[in-house]
Image (spheres, helix red, strand yellow):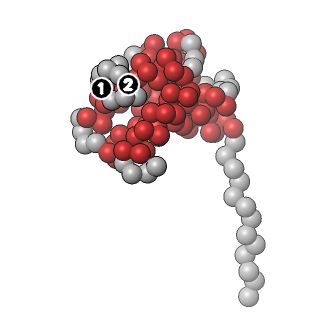
Amino acid sequence: MQLATAYPPVPPSPKRVISVALKAYARVAEAWGLGLKEAAALADMSESTWKRARKPGFAGELTKDQLLRLSALIGIYKALELYFSEPLARVWFTRPNAGPLFNGARPVDVAIEGGLPQILAVRSHLDALRGGA
């Protein structure tokens, strides 16, 4: 009897990671009803770059900051989908929020203004709401 040799899994290529992240984020931005300007600002891209990046076959690179932003935004989307039912899960990010993290502003605006640290704070806030942190 010959045992199969276990090889470590091959990590996805950086291009594949970028492609999957952009595709997922484009779906999130669409589900939230974000405009071009908001979606680009959240991803820390110019509007023209976001227009190109959301199309299949984008050959550009993303910074680690941009990839972390996309990951956190996808995590926010997932947390909202798990915590709230439709349609609140889809509109929560774009509606004014009286919570202390937002002070009456829309979470999307707070995230754009505060950049990556604020995006991560929103993600942590939602994880805590659903009992994950």
Residue under the point 69% across and 58% down = 9
Note whether 84 is above or below 98 in the view shown: below
On the rendered structure, is 12 left or right of 54? right
Q: Residues within 10 Å of mark 2 (few under 14, many from 20)?
A: some
Residue 65 is tagged as none
* Quarter in which the N terminus is drawn: bottom right
* Location of mark 1 (residue): 98
Q: Toward which corner of the image does residue 84 lie, by quadrant?
A: top left
Q: Residue furthest bottom?
A: 1
Image coordinates for residue 106, horizontal then vertical, percent: 35, 21
Dot 2 corresponds to which residue?
102
Asked whether disc 2 touches disc 1, contact meaning CB atoms under 8 Å apart, the reply is: yes
Q: Amino acid at mark 2?
A: Phe
Q: Is residue 99 visible?
A: yes
**Residue drawn 45% across and 33% down?**
122
Q: Secondary structure at mark 1?
A: loop
- Of residues 91 and 124, the one nearer the viewer is 124
* Quarter-of-image position of residue 88: top left
Q: Is residue 130 left or right of residue 118?
A: left
Rate crowding at label 1 as few (under 14), some (14 to 19) or many (20 or more) other CA atoms within 10 Å: few
Describe residue 8's horizontal placement relative to residue 96 as left or right.
Answer: right
Give the residue drawn at x 49%, y 33%.
121
- The residue that appears at 72% across and 75% down in the rendered structure is 4
Residue 102 in the image, given as x and y percentages of width and height: 38, 24
Question: Whole-percent x and y of residue 24?
Answer: 48, 36
